[in-house]
Image (cartoon, rainbow, N blue to C red):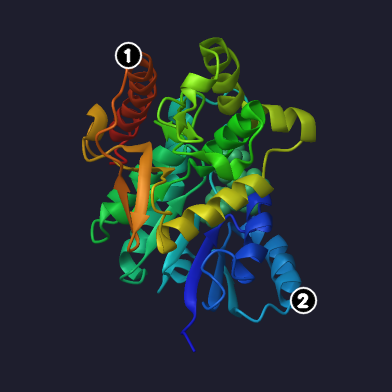
């Protein structure tokens, strides 16, 4: 049978971690034939809660769960890892300026990039979930010079699924009928969920909805969904974020279906006028464990303006971390 694949989850004792680990251990991320050696990285204050989660994992008796490591040492956590899910991050506190947020996260993602560079397996793939995810991915990858940049990506799959859900509800169709949704840009309020290339029943979604709904309801609903969930639940989205992370890695490893694409933030190669090197969300396909940016889509003026605004925010974040000496 197959050798266990090491999977590292950072911030493992947090709420996304709690929703994520059981699904990884049950085989929903890498598939039913792949045993998993789980590594849980936490800060010292998180270790006790991580031990508790590990006890529950043991109590599930998952046949695919080979072993569990719990550590506050990034070098140990990433040693030999093939899949790294970087979930733990420094959230924006009250009155915290963007510079403070970026520098606090630099203090997390720089050493993690270095530890990945030092010890990760040759086939490592790194998904950044912790916010600001795009820029945290840029920091981690820049401190991992021996790992191809394309082995890093940041998560916009939850935004993608949120857009799918809104379109399915609006048109009264099953989610499986909604294809070619794209999230462009930053995983932030400036993200642009694009319906001009999305299809239902072989026709553009933009042609089946009013421009007023698209601009006035759809885009803000998707972009502000996280805040709406906090408002309703009294806690931020966790199970849906974990689901998106599972599906992101599953797609990366197993590929996208023929004739469709998904969304992920990948290092730009200059496609669609997005400056090379920044991690921006694009329409992507996956095959053979590699993301490819879908090429040749026509971008109208409305979409151009939205994409440019989100990309501008990303270049500003890049410039700010550069000024902090983090690139
Ligand atoms: P969560 O598990 O709820 O969230 C973790 C991160 O995911 C946050 O940065 C959050 O960003 C981000 N995120 C991305 N997309 C979403 C989404 N759609 N919905 C919600 N969150 C999203 O945070 P907790 O505070 O419960 O747990 C964090 C854990 O990380 C703690 O246990 C802490 O100890 C640990 N930690 C570990 C580190 C390490 O391993 N070195 C470093 C830092 C922290 P946002 O805040 O913007 O919502």
Residue at screen point 75% across, 74% down: 60
Pointer 2: residues within 10 angstroms few (<14), some, or many (20+)? few
Marks 2 and 1: CB-CB under 8 Å?
no
Residue at screen point 27% across, 60% down: 147
Whether residue 264 is visible, yes or no, is yes
Residue corresponding to mark 1: 301
Up the image or down, 42 lies above or below 33; here it is above
Residue at screen point 71% across, 32% down: 229
Q: Secondary structure under badge 2?
A: helix
x then y, percent, for residue 135: 39, 38
Per the rendering, the mark at residue 59 is 2
Pointer 1: residues within 10 angstroms few (<14), some, or many (20+)? few
Of residue 179 and residue 65, the one placed in the foreground of this image is 179
Q: Residue furthest top?
A: 212
Of residue 234 and residue 94, the one placed in the foreground of this image is 234
Image quarter of residue 170: top right
- Of the numbered discs 2 and 1, the one sitting upstream in the chain is 2
Per the rendering, the mark at residue 203 is none
Up the image or down, 212 lies above or below 175; here it is above
Question: In this image, 130 relative to 280: left or right?
Answer: right
x then y, percent, for residue 198: 45, 32
The Cα atoms of the two marked residues, 2 and 1, are separated by 55 Å
Residue at screen point 47% across, 33% down: 199
Question: In this image, 27 relative to 296: left or right?
Answer: right
Question: In this image, 173 relative to 36: left or right?
Answer: right
x then y, percent, for residue 141: 32, 51
| Image quarter of the C terminus | top left
Q: Secondary structure under badge 1?
A: helix
Up the image or down, 203 lies above or below 116; here it is above
Of residue 324 and residue 278, the one placed in the foreground of this image is 278
């Amino acid at each position: 049978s197959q050798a266990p694949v090491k999977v590292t989850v950072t911030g493992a004792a947090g709420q996304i971690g709690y929703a994520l680990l059981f699904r990884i251990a049950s085989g929903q991320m890498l598939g039913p034939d792949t045993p998993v050696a789980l590594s849980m990285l936490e800060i010292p204050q998180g270790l006790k809660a991580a031990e508790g989660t590990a006890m529950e994992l043991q109590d599930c008796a998952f046949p695919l769960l080979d072993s569990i490591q719990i550590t506050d040492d990034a070098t140990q956590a990433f040693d030999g890892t093939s899949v790294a899910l970087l979930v733990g991050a420094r959230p924006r506190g009250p009155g915290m300026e963007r510079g403070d947020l970026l520098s606090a996260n630099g203090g997390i993602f720089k050493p993690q990039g270095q530890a990945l560079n030092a010890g990760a397996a040759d086939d490592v793939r790194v998904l950044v979930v912790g916010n600001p995810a795009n820029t945290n991915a840029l920091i981690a990858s820049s401190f991992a010079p021996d790992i191809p940049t394309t082995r890093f990506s940041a998560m916009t799959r939850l935004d993608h699924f949120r857009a799918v859900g809104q379109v399915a509800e609006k048109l009264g169709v099953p989610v499986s009928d909604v294809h070619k949704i794209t999230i462009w840009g930053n995983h932030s309020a400036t993200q642009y969920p694009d319906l001009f290339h999305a299809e239902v029943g072989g026709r553009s979604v933009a042609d089946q909805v009013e421009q007023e709904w698209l601009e006035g309801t759809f885009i803000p609903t998707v972009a502000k969904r996280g805040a709406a969930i906090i408002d309703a639940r009294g806690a931020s989205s966790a199970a849906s974020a974990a689901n998106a992370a599972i599906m992101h890695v599953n797609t990366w490893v197993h590929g996208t279906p023929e004739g469709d694409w998904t969304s992920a933030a990948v290092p730009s190669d200059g496609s669609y006028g997005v400056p090379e090197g920044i991690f921006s969300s694009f329409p992507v396909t996956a095959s053979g464990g590699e993301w490819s940016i879908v090429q040749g889509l026509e971008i109208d003026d409305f979409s151009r303006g939205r994409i440019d605004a989100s990309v501008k925010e990303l270049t500003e974040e890049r410039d700010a971390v550069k000024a902090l000496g983090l690139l």
